[in-house]
Amino acid sequence: MIREADRNITVAGQPNGSKTNLEMVGLFAALLSVVGSFLAGFLLGEDSSGGARFDFYNFHWPIIQRFSTVPWGTAVADYGSATNPLLYVIASLLPLQGDQKIYHATTLVVALLIWPLLSWAYYRRYSNYGIDWLWASFGASTILISPNFRSSAFWGTTDFLPFVFCAGTSVLLSRLQDSEGDKARAIGLLTLVAVAAVSVCAFYTRQLYAFLPVFAAWMILTRTKTSPLLVLSVFLIAMLPEMLLLYIWKGINPPGPQSAHQFHPAMINVLCVGANIGFLSTPLILGCIRRSLGDVLPEWWGARSTVIAFAGLLVFIIALGGTEWPKLGGGIIVKAGLRMGALGTPFILTVSYFGLVAAIVFSMRSATNALLVSTFLVPLFTVRETYQKYLEPTLAVALFLFADTETARTAFNKRVLMYNFLFSALILTIGIVYYDLLHLNLPEIPR
């Protein structure tokens, strides 16, 4: 009888073990494919976001040379890019010897190392919620098939570097990030300085990451017993270089691009942000749905809210039906809409509307989410046109790393990670075909 029971237990356990082994093999195969694709894209000079090659030759490489040959104070006073100068400062310290190949190889290695760093950040936050290192690595590997991340890494533009600081900030905050009850004990001065320095570095690379130091400071103030005066003092000191830049530039951007990048709250910018959020949040929403859409809607949402939402959509489309869309930029939704004729504008506006509604509903879940949404989106309205590259893959990374505990645990599940991976692979395929194979809407590279 005992032997028969043991045999039955063994037989019954085989399918589960086989399923686990098959899952591991599938994940390892996916990771190897991603890394292989990343290296192949570099060797082939891929630019699947459509503008990184142009930006490198027209802006970034000349600025790197300028920072390498003249004092930083002189170089920072006036240059052609609209981004903050940390990347150029770091590049000027490297022994590049004027060789673009050395620079590109360096950015490739750094970008590839962001993958294990981001994996560590995901694992630190979700290991207590059923996510092992392999799934955390798989979730992080999605950035390696992100068109914007790949193009930035291959061509050495600024958009890959802030992910180092996003992951680093999350790792430093992981001990206290989910302590939403009683406040944790005060953190040490060295840890506080490290959090301030790492989070501010993201902002010093790109102004769009201003949300990170604000969020980090707020997290420490609300989740720990650290002295508020000490927290504010350390973060204010970390922001002193930005005060100097504001004084030199007489604004948040260098003097050259000021006219094109001043605060410009045009409706077209809001609509492009909404369209990108609606598009890029699709795999996250679908992955959280189990039985119905009610799984991802707040408890107070009912039939009345649904009627009001669709009535608002109708008013939204009618009121903005004459919107003129940018022919360059805007993202996949805008590009697809421009080729749909009479249905194009309603299509773009519908996606934009639901993207804005999704952001509002997400922000109403908690004070943490409200702060994240507001500080994440406001900088996007300080540029004249918000391209898809500003939100992809930053939107998913910011959500996974910094959303409140309940939202993060709901969103960071295996279904979401799988959908997000496949979705990113689809975007990459579209980008490669559109830009690298067909060469559509590409700016001319200066000679």
Image (cartoon, rainbow, N blue to C red):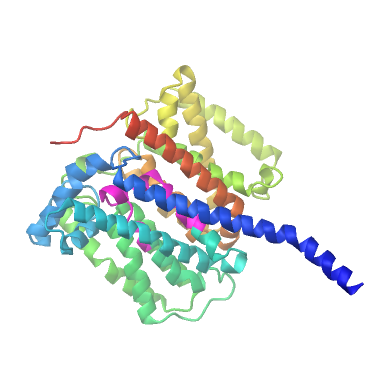
Q: Which contiguous range is marked in magenta?
A: 138-165
Image quarter where the N terminus lies is bottom right
Q: Residue at x 15, y 36 (%)?
A: 446
How many numbered badges does the structure rendering display? 0
In screen coordinates, is 118 left or right of 415? left
Q: Depth check: 351 or 58 in front?
A: 58
Q: Where does the image place residue 236, in percent across and percent down from the top left?
A: 30, 69
Q: Depth check: 130 or 251 in front?
A: 130
Image quarter where the C terminus lies is top left
Above or below, 361 relative to 341: below
Q: Residue at x 33, y 53 (%)?
A: 160
Q: Residue at x 21, y 62 (%)?
A: 90
Q: Where does the image place residue 243, in percent across and percent down from the top left?
A: 22, 62
Look at the image and say whether residue 243 sits in the magenta stretch: no
Look at the image and say whether residue 161 sits in the magenta stretch: yes
In screen coordinates, is 329 left or right of 320? left
Q: Depth check: 34 or 87 in front?
A: 34
Is residue 77 at all visible to an observer of this figure? Answer: no
Q: Main secondary structure of the magenta part?
A: helix
Above or below, 288 relative to 265: below
Q: Give the farthest residue toward the left.
A: 70
Q: Where does the image place residue 157, in percent across and percent down from the top left?
A: 26, 49
Is residue 48 at all visible to an observer of this figure? Answer: yes
Q: Depth check: 161 or 106 in front?
A: 106
Q: Where does the image place residue 153, in percent across and percent down from the top left?
A: 31, 51
In screen coordinates, is 46 left or right of 429? left
Above or below, 380 relative to 13: above
Q: Give the farthest residue toward the right.
A: 1
| Quadrant of the rendered image containing residue 86 | bottom left
